Image: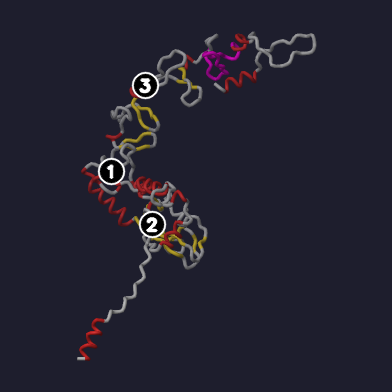
Amino acid sequence: EEEEEEEEIVRKAPSPMPIPKPKPIAFRSPRKYVWFPSDLTTDKEVERYFEPFDVAHRPIRGTIGERFLRTLILRQLPHHDVDKKSCRGLAKEHYNEFDKFVEMKVTNHSDCGSVIVLDEPRKCFHCSEFLDPGDMCVTTELVQDETGDNAIFHRDTCFKCEVCDEPFAELLCFYVPKDDALVCSRDYNNALKPRCKGCDESIFDEEYSSADGANFHTDHFACVQCDSLLHDQQYILVNTNPCCINCYEETFASVCEGCKEMITVEDKKITDGKKNGKCWHDQCFVCSECHQPLRGRVCIPREGHLYCREDYQLKFKLMKRKSVRKKPTSTRQSVAKTPVAEDIWSMAQTF
């Protein structure tokens, strides 16, 4: 009985308290940054990576740095460059060519930069300055340096597109063999295919329109106002956008200060050189007195009229002016002088 009582006491004895395990330190960087390199696994590494970056370029949530990154992604990585379903100007007969182009781009000529810490001095591929052992940098297998190793770059200033000079969005870079250039996704497409200014998509058609350094799908080369096609038609650029003659004259044409009539595309126009300034027909830009052309001559505006230098002096030289100077002490009367040449020139410059 005593043994049974002892066993019951042992069974009823409380078990020892378990030793609490230390809580793992939370990885806070995903909550702070909208993006950071996947090579980094601790908050300390992430903070060290972004330390040399300008504050406006650190993708911290809710800051200008987040907006900068999102704008960079939209500009460098548009959906229509890799997804034919997002294309408006791609014809169905070019779907296969588009798929092969994207496959070549992604499989053979793309890479995501890797963050490494150097164990020996090495030269930056972009600026040729040396980085010391222990420095953090970015490397890519798309480019090799003079020693045959994968090139390295300063992570904040040198790992950027060779065409647009912008940092690679999320370290995504592409290599163009024919140009031996490391570029962003947009400039990779631009190097191999013309880009339509109308829809911002790469052009896979053999025939397309070109105007003033810009390319268009044939169906997208249209007036910015009425959308009428401009193929084999006259047009005028308005803020770098093509505009047909009719829309230009109805919406953007200037009005002559002389005759108050519209200045058409075929008319010669003279302006005062100011933004949104006054304009004249060539035949209306004349002196109000002698009616001689003022092109290439000194012209002086006064009371809404233009005068040549000679007629201005003849018309206004007798006008009396109140002198702000003291009267002379001598008995001789002071004679009012006509405006000197410098005064006339200053008037002409403010016109």
Residue at mark 3: 249
Provide the secondary structure element on which disc 2 rests: loop
Circles 1 and 2: CB atoms closer than 8 Å: no
- The image position of residue 91, as x and y in percent, is 23, 41
Provide the secondary structure element on which disc 1 rests: loop
Q: Which residues are magenta?
A: 292-311
Residue at mark 2: 36
**First in residue order: circle 3 vs circle 2:** 2
- Which residue is rendered at x = 27% and y = 41% of the image? 205
Q: Amino acid at mark 1?
A: Phe
**Residue 191 appears in the rendering:** no
Residues packed near mark 1 inside 10 Å, few (<14), some (14 to 19) or many (20 plus): some
Provide the secondary structure element on which disc 3 rests: helix
- The image position of residue 81, as x and y in percent, is 30, 47
Q: Amino acid at mark 3?
A: Glu
> In the figure, residue 94 lies in which quadrant?
top left
- The image position of residue 171, as x and y in percent, is 39, 55
- Horizontally, residue 83 falls left or right of residue 65, namely left
Quadrant containing the N terminus is bottom left
**Residue 193 appears in the rendering:** yes
